[in-house]
Image: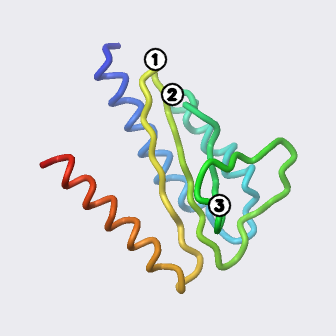
Amino acid sequence: MDQVEALMKAGKIASQVRSEVLSMVEVGTPIVKICDFVEGRIRGLGGAPAFPCNVNIGHVAAHYTSPEGDGSAVPGGSLVKMDIGVHVDGYIADTAITVCLNRGLEGQVEAAEAGLDAALKAVMA
């Protein structure tokens, strides 16, 4: 597999897993269950995790990895940010998504999405 093919495959896997994990993000879902699903699904689709799955709740902006034996679960009224990385033959795709479980915080998600859209337009110009 050449470099472009490996990168494209990693991106497709990351995108698919990101879409599939959304339905798991509900109040009471153990964070480790989300991480196990993400990492197992990446492997099942032919990739490997580029880094441990990150599930960040509330004020934790990034890079929280559920440790072994973690008993924490998705709390009500929270922002849940997931960061997923996939590598295929060493070529990495990294993607993230935020799930809002609190209507009062939807403006933060909209602002982040607007920033991403503006950045993508600038890069693509």
Look at 35% across and 27% down and name the residue there.
Answer: 7
Q: In the drawing, what numbered circle is on residue 47?
A: 2
> Which residue is label 3 attached to?
60
Dot 1 falls on a residue whose secondary structure is: loop
The number of numbered discs placed on residues in the rendered structure image is 3
Q: Quadrant of residue 67?
A: top right
Identify the mark at residue 20; answer none if there is no mark: none
Foreground residue among 90 and 116: 116
Amino acid type, callout 2: Gly
Q: Residue at x 60, y 64 (%)?
A: 80
Packing grade of label 2 (10 A; few <14, some 14-19, many >=20) is many
The residue closer to the viewer here, 122 or 35, is 122
User: Marks 1 and 3, how far apart in space?
Assistant: 31 Å
Q: Quick one: label 3, few (<14), some, or many (20+) residues within 10 Å?
A: few
Q: Amino acid at mark 3?
A: Val
Q: Nearer the viewer, mark 3 or mark 2?
A: 3
> Is residue 8 toward the left or the right of residue 125 in the image?
right
